[in-house]
Image (cartoon, grey):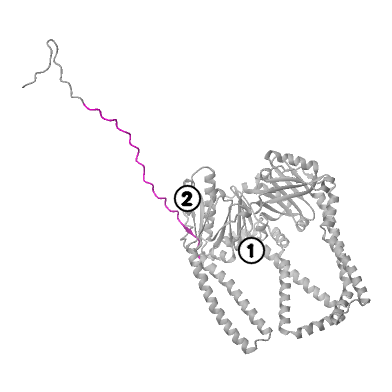
């Protein structure tokens, strides 16, 4: 049956109604697709130079061989001295001990070489986006992380053998003081060391500026970024053998004749061009704005004034002579005792003035020779001395045979120290150094440092006082506003200094007391002998006779020496009271302590970690105070002290400390 369309008369036809459609749910938003996490690429490992294996093996083996040979020789010599070995037995024993020693040494050498080879495989460093990492250890693994913000200085040192092969030891100081040790990276080539130093400083500056170190120019993890076009200076560097004949004679001659140089600069220039067997090409570490060296006069005077090792050498000779005498007594037994008794009788009865004079001349000659040798050694240690300002860093290098490079960022300088020893004061010169925060260093090279490394960063060892402002303006212009109006110690400080230095701390006074006590003791002993209180044998009588003959003369000499020392102590106290003072202005504090030697320390106010004024009952009665200002210089902090400042001046200084909160009453 057909369905008719639905319409009404008089109306147009209507289209058919669409069938109802069920409502569809609204589409839900889909989360964006997350990228799959990609594993971070491992940082490249930079191994130290392969000379670490065999140079360290040679050094260790030489030490072991010397110790074993000395021990065996001492044992055989002792047996021969005791008469337990005759000629044949001694030869047989020597052959047996020598053969056993050779086998033992071969085993030790093999162990040392294998140990160095294995440790070399596990000794490397990485330069990451935010920190430097040093990995070492075979069984006990050690990984040291150094954030770039913590790097304070990057120093390098090289022994003579290391200089020949163009390698050095790098110490990264994080300025942790005595509680922290410098991170030591051994046996890097010169190119590696220079690249690493520039890389660490650049990355630290990039982080301080808020940039990503890897995106900064010249701070990528490849050495070529520091010196464009230069060969790689990390692990895998090919050995570079420099031709000594190709050294530039003109440059060496100019270094030797330059008004600001000295004769040893020629050798330093030769070392600079001969980078060693594995040294590699020089790296660009930044422009130098100020630099100076030592003149011939300054080098000579610095060498003469830095001869503190003479006493140690003389003491070593005395100990060696005593050991030799002991060996002779063991070897010859009663014959040596008889010879000594006869010599004692001879000297007690027939000692002549010419013999005493000859012995004295020999002793003086030996001391003079040792002094000259020590002075020559000091001059060589200062050879090639250069101090410079490079950007925001201060750098010092020195050493003709053993080379040392030290540096510090200027914002880490804690103080400027002008030090005048007695000899320097006679010539009108001083030693100029910078106090900086140091970390402990247990490396082998650290035990061999001279005075340069033990007294802060010495920027000039022997300079005319009139040149100090010029050098400070070039090296540390940040210290240009030092105070000029000083406050001397109180007037009563002179009397207190004489009592303190001449009596309480005076060596001459107590030596005089000892000499007087010696005279009293000898008088009592002689009276006791005359009264028969002691029953002595012939040896004791001989000793008492020697004391009675020479004792008064010796005590008289000691008393005269004591009087001289007392006078020296009093003069030193007077000089101290006249020259000691302190001063402060808006930014800096300065403390001077005088005497036969003089030291002036200047430091910024913000570097003072702790300051106080201390008094004892006697000082309170005299109206004086002791000032103490502590900075972070050194490995555990340094406290600068001024005794007997006037109480009013001390209170003014404490008020000056108040804005920073560093005030202790």
70 versus 229 height, above or below:
below
**Residue at disc 2, secondary structure:** loop
Residue 263 appears in the figure = no
Q: Which of marks 2 and 1 is in front?
A: 1
Q: Residue at x 72, y 78 (%)?
A: 326
232 versus 36 height, above or below:
below
Residue 392 appears in the figure = yes
Mark 2 nearby-residue class (10 Å; few <14, some 14–19, many ≥20) = some
Quarter of the image where one finds residue 104: bottom right
Q: Where is residue 525 in the image (x, y as percent from the top left)?
A: 90, 73
Residue bearing the label numbered 2: 220
Q: Where the N terminus falls, by quadrant?
A: top left
Left or right of 395 on screen, residue 625: right
Q: Where is residue 548 in the image (x, y as percent from the top left)?
A: 89, 75
Q: Does the magenta stretch include residue 418?
A: no
Q: Position of residue 627 (x, y in %)?
A: 75, 47
Magenta span covers which residues? 21-50
């Amino acid at each position: 049956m057909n369905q008719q369309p639905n319409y009404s008369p008089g109306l147009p036809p209507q289209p058919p109604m669409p069938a109802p459609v069920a409502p569809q749910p609204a589409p839900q938003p889909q989360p964006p697709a997350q990228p799959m996490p990609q594993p971070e690429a491992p940082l490249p490992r930079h191994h130290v130079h392969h000379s670490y294996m065999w140079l360290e093996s040679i050094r260790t083996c030489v030490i072991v061989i010397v110790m074993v040979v000395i021990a065996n020789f001492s044992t055989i010599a002792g047996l021969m001295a005791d008469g337990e070995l005759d000629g044949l037995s001694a030869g047989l024993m020597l052959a047996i001990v020598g053969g056993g020693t050779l086998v033992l040494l071969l085993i030790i050498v093999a162990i040392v070489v294998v140990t160095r080879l294995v440790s070399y495989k596990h000794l490397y460093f990485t330069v990451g986006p935010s920190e430097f990492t040093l990995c070492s250890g075979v069984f006990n693994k050690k990984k040291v992380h150094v954030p770039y913000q913590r790097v304070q200085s990057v120093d390098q040192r090289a022994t003579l053998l290391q200089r020949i092969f163009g390698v050095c030891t790098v110490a990264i100081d994080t300025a942790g003081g005595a509680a922290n040790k410098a991170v030591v990276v051994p046996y890097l080539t010169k190119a590696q060391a220079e690249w690493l130093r520039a890389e660490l400083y650049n990355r630290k500056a990039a982080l301080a500026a808020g940039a990503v170190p890897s995106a900064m120019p010249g701070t990528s993890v490849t050495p070529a970024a520091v010196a464009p076009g230069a060969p790689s200076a990390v692990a895998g560097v090919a050995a570079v053998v420099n031709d000594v004949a190709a050294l530039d004679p003109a440059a060496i001659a100019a270094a030797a004749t330059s008004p600001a140089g000295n004769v040893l600069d020629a050798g330093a220039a030769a070392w600079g061009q001969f980078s060693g067997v594995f040294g590699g090409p020089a790296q660009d570490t930044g422009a130098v704005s100020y630099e100076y060296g030592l003149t011939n006069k300054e080098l000579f005077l610095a060498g003469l004034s830095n001869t503190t090792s003479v006493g140690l050498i003389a003491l070593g000779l005395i100990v060696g002579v005593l050991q030799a005498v002991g060996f002779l007594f063991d070897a010859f037994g009663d014959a040596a005792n008889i010879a000594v008794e006869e010599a004692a009788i001879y000297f007690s009865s027939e000692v002549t003035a010419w013999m005493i004079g000859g012995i004295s001349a020999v002793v003086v000659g030996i001391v003079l020779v040792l002094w000259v040798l020590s002075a020559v050694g000091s001059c060589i240690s200062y050879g090639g001395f250069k101090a410079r300002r490079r950007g925001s860093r201060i750098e010092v290098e020195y050493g003709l045979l053993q080379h040392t490079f030290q540096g510090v960022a200027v914002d880490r300088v804690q103080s400027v120290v002008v030090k005048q020893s007695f000899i320097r004061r006679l010539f009108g010169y001083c030693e100029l150094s910078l106090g900086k925060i140091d970390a402990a260093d247990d490396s082998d090279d650290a035990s061999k440092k001279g005075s340069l490394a033990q007294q802060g960063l010495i920027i000039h060892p022997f300079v005319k006082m009139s040149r100090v402002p010029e050098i400070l303006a070039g090296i540390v212009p940040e210290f240009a506003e030092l105070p000029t109006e000083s406050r001397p110690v109180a007037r009563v400080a002179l009397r207190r200094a004489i009592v303190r230095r001449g009596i309480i701390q005076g060596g001459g006074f107590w030596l005089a007391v000892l000499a007087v006590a010696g005279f009293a003791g000898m008088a009592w002993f002689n009276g006791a002998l005359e009264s028969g209180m002691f029953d002595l044998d012939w040896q004791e009588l001989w000793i008492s006779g020697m004391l009675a003959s020479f004792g008064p003369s010796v005590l008289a000499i000691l008393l005269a020496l004591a009087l001289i020392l007392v006078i020296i102590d009093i003069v030193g106290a007077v000089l101290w009271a006249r020259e000691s003072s302190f001063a402060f202005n808006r930014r800096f504090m300065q403390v001077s302590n005088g005497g036969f030697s003089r030291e002036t320390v200047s430091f910024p106010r913000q570097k003072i970690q702790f300051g106080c004024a201390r008094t004892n009952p006697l000082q309170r009665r005299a109206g004086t105070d002791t000032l103490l200002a502590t900075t972070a210089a050194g490995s555990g902090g340094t406290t600068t002290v001024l005794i007997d400042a006037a109480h009013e001046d001390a209170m003014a200084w404490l008020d000056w400390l108040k804005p920073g909160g560093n005030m202790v009453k």
